[in-house]
Image (tube, rainbow, N blue to C red):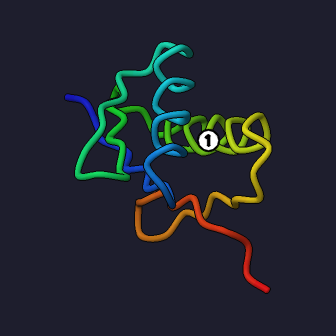
Amino acid sequence: MDEVVRVVAARIPDRNRLLALLSENGHDARPVNGVEIDVHVPAVATTEPAIYSEVEDAVMNIGDAFVPVKHQGVIYVRPPVG
């Protein structure tokens, strides 16, 4: 059975970029409710850190000042504080 890792972007353009990058890297990523992405992954304990790492890479490739933060099983992509 697959697990779902939820990714929440700050804006729709950011969601679209992340969605494209995750899909290009072979993930079953689907848009949900505006700025969210559900990534369907095999139920393996090491998958979530891999998704988090790819989201970090995507943020760096996009070049925007956004920070991925994991909170209660959801990865949020938000502007930096301060």
Q: Tell me where residue 39 sits by quadrant.
A: top left
Query: Residue at 55% across / 33% down in the picture?
Result: 17
The residue lying furthest to the front in this view is 13
Q: Tell me where residue 73 sits by quadrant.
A: bottom left
The residue lying furthest to the bottom in this view is 82
Q: Is residue 20 left or right of residue 59?
A: left
- Please provide percent x and percent y for residue 2: 25, 30
Query: Residue at 46% across / 31% down in the picture?
Result: 19
**How busy is the neighbourhood of tag 1: few (under 14 within 10 Å), some, or many (20 plus)?**
many
Query: Which three-letter amino acid code belongs to the residue tagged 1?
Result: Val
Front residue of this view, candidates 73 and 45: 73
Front residue of this view, candidates 16 and 46: 16
- Please provide percent x and percent y for residue 12: 43, 48
- Please provide percent x and percent y for residue 42: 34, 26
State the residue position of label 1. 55
Count of numbered badges drawn on the protein: 1
Q: Tell me where residue 4 sits by quadrant.
A: top left
Say if 35 sits above or below 53 in the image.
Answer: below
Front residue of this view, candidates 51 and 76: 76
Q: Which image quarter holds the N terminus?
A: top left
Q: Which image quarter holds the C terminus?
A: bottom right
Query: Residue at 36% across / 43% down in the picture?
Result: 37
Say if 70 sits above or below 40 in the image.
Answer: below
Query: Residue at 51% across / 61% down in the picture?
Result: 10
- Please provide percent x and percent y for residue 14: 54, 45
Where disc 1 sits, the SS reads helix
Q: Is residue 68 left or right of residue 80?
A: left
